Each structure stands twice: as structure tokens, then as C-alpha cells.
Image (cartoon, rainbow, N blue to C red):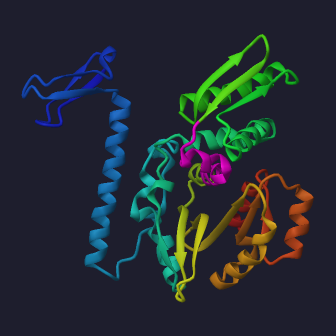
């Protein structure tokens, strides 16, 4: 059954599922009221409850400055069945408060970006699909990025050299780009085996394809890893830190495991060499162990990862090995 809920008088009743999405008059106050899918409605209530509970706990802590954050505040319980791809629970200040405290102890201020933690959009889904199939979808990404750089309005993908299974994966991804409005139009000519995409020009979409997708991918894969392992963790993504001398930097991904193990990750989908010195200095300023400060470079080989890590004062990883490295790191 679906749910009819009036925002004006709080009238609530069940109605048949075929009415989901409709707007009707409330039988009590006659105000326009939406009919919701029950599962979606309940999930939204749970998310709102989590946010309000976090604010309540924050007020409690404000009234008791010496209170410690309990270990349970840092855990996303798997048995709560949180949909990691459709939740605002990571925006709860109690979730990331241990990270704020960790930086404050180093006299570093943090500016949180809640939009970068909210997975109720589709950036995370597209990023995971792209990352999990990157060897096959790299050509799609490269063509989109090239078109964006040259201000082209569309892209044509020739799939004649691909197998049926590969074509299914590529066209499925492109169709999802359209369904989630990452492209304006999608058409697949089966006879010619060509995909036609009309691109979006919005800066958020351009930025996503230009590298932000990799941040989302790393964030979501780690989130899933720690959530399923029922580990204690806090997380932030795409946030700013400011040192005491007012030096300001953006951090791509940061996890704090068990309240004490930092995992600092910078993601590079293109040129990375000019940033090595910057991150080596930042690691030393934050006093993070080398193995905990990661520069994830898309597409580098395992041999390059090993060699670069030996050469420099940070740890290099690639998109296929970062989960294993972090799992070993946090298992110690």
C-alpha cells in the first residue's frame, strides 16, 4: 500500500499503490496532498530522524563540554539497512565530528561540504558504474571529456569493434547517463552500432566527468567496505582544511577509522606529477604516517605504484588496489 500524507493537517492513511505520485485533496482539510511510495516515505523519515537525533546529541554535548563521543556515534550499522546510494546520513554532524576533532588537535580548521556527502543524487551511482567498468568505459569518458574541452555539443561512439556483452555494458552505461540527466539525449543505432550522445553543459556535470567522478568512486567503495565490515569510522569528502597560518587546501577523501587511524586520499585522473611535492609537504604538516597518506592515480600500473612509493614520501595507489591497501592498513 502507498501512503497519503497531508503536510497541512498531518492526516495519514494508506491507499492503493497505483496512486503513487498523484496529488489529491486531503479529505480533512482539502489541501493538496501527495501520495508516496511507502518504502521511499519511510526511508526519508529515517533520514530526517537521523539528522534531528544528531542535532539533539550535538546540543547535549554543547551543554556538557567534557562529554566524549561514544563509539556508537561513529558507526553506520549494517543491520539498519541504510541505502548508501540514497541517504543524507553522512551529512549528520555527529558522523563526521571525530574528524573535526582530529584536525582541531592539530590546530587545523575544517570546512565541511554537505553536498559532497549526500548520496541522494545520482553522482555516486554513475561514478561506481564507471569505476567498476573503467577499462571498458574509459573510451566513453575520454570522448566526453574531449568534447567538453572543445565545446562540442555531442559525441558519437562507434561500437563495431566490441563484443555483444561489451556493447551491452557500454549502451547500458550511456542509457543511465541519459536516465540520470548526465547527458541531454541518448540514441543507439543498432544497425550501425553507434551511440549518439548530446552533452550537458552544466558546470557540475562537466566537473564530474573531468575528475570528480573518481572522488565519488573512491568514497563510495570505501564507504561500502567499512559499512559491510561493520567497522567504526567517520568520513568526509571534498572539504577544505585551513592551517594556523591560513594556508588553505581542499581534501578529496578522508576516513577516520576507530577514531584514531586517519586515511587521507587525494585522487588524480590526469596529471599528478606536479602535485607530488605539495602532498609530501602536507603529509608532514599533518603528521600522518606515509602508508596512511595516499595519492590515488587513475590508470597507473602496480609496478609504477610500487616504484613511486619507494621514491617519494607518500603512498601511491591505483583504482584497483586502494581497497586492499586500506583493508590491510586498518586490519593492523
Extreme bottom residue here? 245
Classify the position of the N terminus by image quarter: top left
In the rendered view, tell whether residue 159 sits above or below residue 285: above
Extreme top residue here? 191
Classify the position of the C terminus by image quarter: bottom right
Quarter location, residue 198: top right
Quarter location, residue 164: top right
Extreme left residue here? 29
| Whole-percent x, y for residue 213 in the image | 64, 49
Q: Magenta stretch containing residue 212, yes or no?
A: yes
In the rendered view, tell whether residue 14 sits above or below residue 240: above
| Whole-percent x, y for residue 196 in the image | 69, 24
The residue lying at 72 percent from left, 55 percent from top is 323
Q: Is residue 234 left or right of residue 193?
A: left
Asked whether residue 214 is in view, the answer is no
| Whole-percent x, y for residue 15 in the image | 25, 19
Number of numbered markers: 0
Q: Nearer the viewer, residue 151 or 86?
A: 151
The residue lying at 89 percent from left, 73 percent from top is 310
In the rendered view, tell whether residue 80 sits above or below residue 307: above
Q: Magenta stretch containing residue 208, yes or no?
A: yes
The residue lying at 7 percent from left, 26 percent from top is 28
Secondary structure that dominates the magenta span = helix
The residue lying at 33 percent from left, 17 percent from top is 17
Q: Nearer the viewer, residue 324 or 290?
A: 290
| Whole-percent x, y for residue 326 in the image | 71, 61
Q: Nearer the viewer, residue 251 or 86?
A: 251
Quarter location, residue 300: bottom right
Q: Is residue 110 left or right of residue 191?
A: left
Q: Which residues are magenta?
A: 200-221
Asked whether residue 268 is in view, the answer is yes
Amino acid at each position: 500500500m502507498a501512503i497519503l500524507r497531508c503536510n497541512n493537517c498531518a492526516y495519514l492513511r494508506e491507499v492503493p499503490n497505483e496512486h503513487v505520485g498523484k496529488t489529491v485533496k486531503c479529505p480533512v482539510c482539502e489541501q493538496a496532498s501527495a501520495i508516496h511510495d511507502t518504502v521511499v516515505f519511510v526511508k526519508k523519515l529515517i533520514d530526517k530522524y537521523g539528522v534531528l537525533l544528531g542535532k539533539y546529541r550535538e546540543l547535549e554535548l554543547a551543554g556538557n563540554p567534557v562529554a566524549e563521543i561514544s563509539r556508537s556515534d561513529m558507526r553506520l550499522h549494517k543491520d539498519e539497512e541504510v541505502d548508501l546510494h540514497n541517504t543524507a546520513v553522512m551529512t549528520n554532524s555527529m558522523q563526521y565530528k571525530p574528524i573535526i576533532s582530529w584536525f582541531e588537535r592539530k590546530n587545523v580548521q575544517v570546512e565541511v561540504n554537505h553536498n559532497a556527502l549526500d548520496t541522494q543524487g545520482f553522482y555516486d551511482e554513475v561514478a561506481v558504474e564507471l569505476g567498476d567498468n573503467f577499462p571498458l568505459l574509459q573510451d566513453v569518458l575520454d570522448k566526453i571529456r574531449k568534447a567538453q574541452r572543445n565545446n562540442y555539443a555531442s559525441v558519437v561512439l562507434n561500437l563495431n569493434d566490441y563484443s555483444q556483452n561489451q556493447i551491452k555494458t557500454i549502451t547500458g552505461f550511456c542509457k543511465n547517463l541519459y536516465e540520470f540527466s548526465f547527458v541531454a539525449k541518448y540514441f543507439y543505432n543498432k544497425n550501425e552500432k553507434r551511440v549518439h550522445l548530446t552533452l550537458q553543459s552544466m558546470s557540475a556535470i562537466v566537473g564530474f566527468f573531468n575528475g570528480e567522478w573518481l572522488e565519488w568512486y573512491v568514497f563510495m567503495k570505501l564507504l561500502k567496505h567499512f559499512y559491510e565490515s561493520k567497522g567504526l569510522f567517520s568520513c568526509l569528502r571534498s572539504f577544505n582544511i585551513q592551517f594556523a597560518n591560513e594556508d588553505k587546501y581542499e581534501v578529496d577523501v578522508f576516513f577516520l577509522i576507530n577514531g584514531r587511524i586517519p586515511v587521507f586520499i587525494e585522487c588524480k585522473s590526469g596529471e599528478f606529477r606536479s602535485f607530488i611535492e605539495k602532498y609530501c609537504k602536507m603529509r608532514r604538516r599533518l603528521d600522518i604516517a606515509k602508508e596512511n597518506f595516499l595519492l590515488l592515480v587513475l590508470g597507473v600500473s602496480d609496478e609504477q605504484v610500487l616504484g613511486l612509493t619507494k621514491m617519494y614520501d607518500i603512498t601511491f595507489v591505483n583504482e584497483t588496489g586502494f581497497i586492499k591497501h586500506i583493508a590491510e592498513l586498518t586490519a593492523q
